[in-house]
């Protein structure tokens, strides 16, 4: 995962532990240990070198970040698109449980998928001197929106806070679900059942998560030698799923729908039932996420399981790890229930 780096401290920015590490010719972890209370595995010579580099740069340790590393009570800002969406609700649950166990306070910000609100919340959390920011929302395809958000995240890191992202934002420590791999699992499942003509219920085209899940499906579908799926971009909710079924009902060749989240898939099931047809018999439906009630609908929803609560827990754990570590990618899993079967004759 690429991380934006500064070549060195400038008069307009505060020097960071990264600047000290580069000046001393050591890793960030070594510089942090050398300037902290715990100097295990750091020789006296290295301690002196790091201290000299810090003095030359007028570096002042960030007390919030140091307190976070010591697992004391600090505030974590969690930014989600919509906490009422079960996907973000389960991630938030993982963050809250892990933060509670570490005696840390969590402040949740809801952006409703507004990129300007997301960048604004990052800036406001930084102004509140939070020790860390966890950004759970999807990255944006729009270049300007993505750049504005990256700038705010980098400024937050430069101010001494830790940043963990759950989507590829190209800055901060990344803990990611394997969205492409999950899309491929859905394609392989439907192809194995004998489906040839399918539709993809895709959400808003400006979200990177939509592209990754869709592209993973399309690439695997193409490898199987099957015709391109019919992609329907619509709202990322139950109404979007209903709309997709109404669209594909006019195409008698479509025998399956891959919905890019479970809410859309459940909406598709509802529309199908309203038309007097049976999910899994007249039209196969695959969702994505495996939200808590995906197994409670009738029939149970076949879906791609994302370890949402674990994502939240790992995000909190990553706050005290190496900020420059490679992205951690958590695999997805196909869960087969009753909404998929062979194509209807």
Image (cartoon, rainbow, N blue to C red):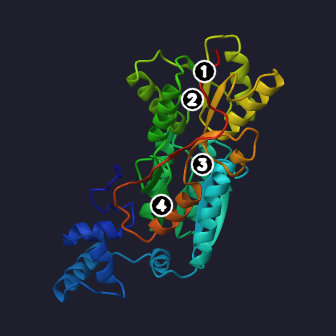
Mark 1 vs mark 2, foreground winner is 1
Q: Are marks 1 and 4 in contact (CB under 8 Å)?
A: no
Tell me: residue 288, above or below residue 97. Answer: above
Q: Report, in whole angstroms, how far the alpha carbon at label 1 lies from the one at label 4.
A: 46 Å
- The local crowd at label 2, few if under 14, some if 14 to 19, many if 20 or more residues have their Cα within 10 Å, is some
- Can you identify the residue that label 4 sits on? 163
Total labels drawn: 4
**Is residue 186 among the parts visible in the rendering?**
yes
Placement of 45 over or under 150, stated as above or below = below
Q: Quadrant of the C terminus?
A: top right
Question: Callout 2: helix, strand or loop?
Answer: loop
The residues bearing labels 1 and 2 have C-alpha atoms spaced at a distance of 29 Å
The percent position of residue 120, horizontal first and vertical second, equals: 60, 51
Closer to viewer: mark 2 or mark 3:
2
Q: Residue at x 62, y 70 (%)?
A: 97
Decide: marks 4, 3 in contact (CB < 8 A)? no
Query: Badge 1 is on which residue?
Result: 343
Secondary structure at badge 4 equals: strand
Q: Position of residue 279 (x, y in %)?
A: 71, 29
The answer to whether the residue labelled 1 contacts the one labelled 2, judged by CB atoms less than 8 Å apart, is no
Secondary structure type for disc 3: helix
Whole-Å distance between the Cαs marked 1 and 3? 42 Å
Q: Nearer the viewer, residue 104 or 143?
A: 104
Q: Which residue is mark 2?
A: 205
Relative horizontal placement of residue 85, taking residue 40 as reference (left or right): right
The residue sitting at 27% across, 56% down in the picture is: 7
Name the residue beneath numbered marker 3: 118
Residue 54 rendering spot, x and y as whole percentages: 28, 77
Which corner quadrant of the image does residue 207 belong to? top right
SS under mark 1: loop
């Amino acid at each position: 995962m690429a991380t934006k780096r500064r070549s060195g401290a400038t008069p307009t920015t505060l020097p960071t532990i990264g600047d000290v590490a580069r000046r001393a010719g050591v890793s960030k972890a070594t510089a942090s240990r050398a300037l902290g209370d715990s100097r295990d595995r750091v020789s006296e010579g290295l301690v002196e070198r790091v201290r000299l580099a810090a003095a030359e740069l007028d570096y002042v340790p960030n007390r919030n970040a140091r307190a976070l590393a010591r697992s004391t009570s600090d505030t974590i800002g969690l930014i989600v698109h919509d906490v009422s969406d079960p996907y973000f609700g389960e991630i938030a649950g993982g963050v809250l449980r892990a933060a509670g166990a570490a005696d840390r306070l969590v402040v949740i910000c809801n952006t409703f998928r507004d990129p300007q609100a997301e960048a604004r919340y990052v800036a406001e959390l930084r102004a509140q001197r939070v020790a860390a920011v966890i950004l759970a929302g999807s990255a944006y395809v729009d270049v300007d929106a993505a750049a504005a958000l990256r700038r705010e995240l980098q400024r937050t890191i430069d101010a001494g806070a830790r940043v963990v992202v759950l989507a590829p934002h190209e800055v901060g420590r990344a803990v990611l679900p394997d969205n492409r791999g999950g899309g491929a699992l859905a394609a392989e499942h439907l192809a194995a059942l004998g489906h040839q003509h399918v539709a993809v219920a895709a959400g808003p085209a400006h979200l990177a998560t939509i592209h990754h899940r869709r592209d993973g499906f399309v690439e695997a579908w193409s490898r199987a030698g099957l015709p391109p799926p019919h992609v329907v971009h619509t709202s990322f909710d139950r109404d979007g799923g209903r709309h997709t079924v109404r669209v594909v009902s006019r195409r008698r060749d479509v025998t399956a729908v891959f919905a890019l989240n479970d809410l859309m898939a459940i909406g598709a099931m509802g529309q199908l039932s309203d038309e007097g047809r049976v999910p899994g018999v007249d039209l196969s439906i695959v969702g994505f996420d495996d939200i808590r009630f995906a197994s409670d609908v009738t029939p149970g929803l076949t879906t791609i399981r994302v370890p949402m609560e674990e994502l939240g827990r790992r995000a909190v754990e990553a706050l005290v790890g190496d900020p420059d570590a490679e992205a951690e990618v958590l695999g997805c899993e196909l869960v087969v229930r009753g909404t998929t079967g062979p194509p209807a004759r």
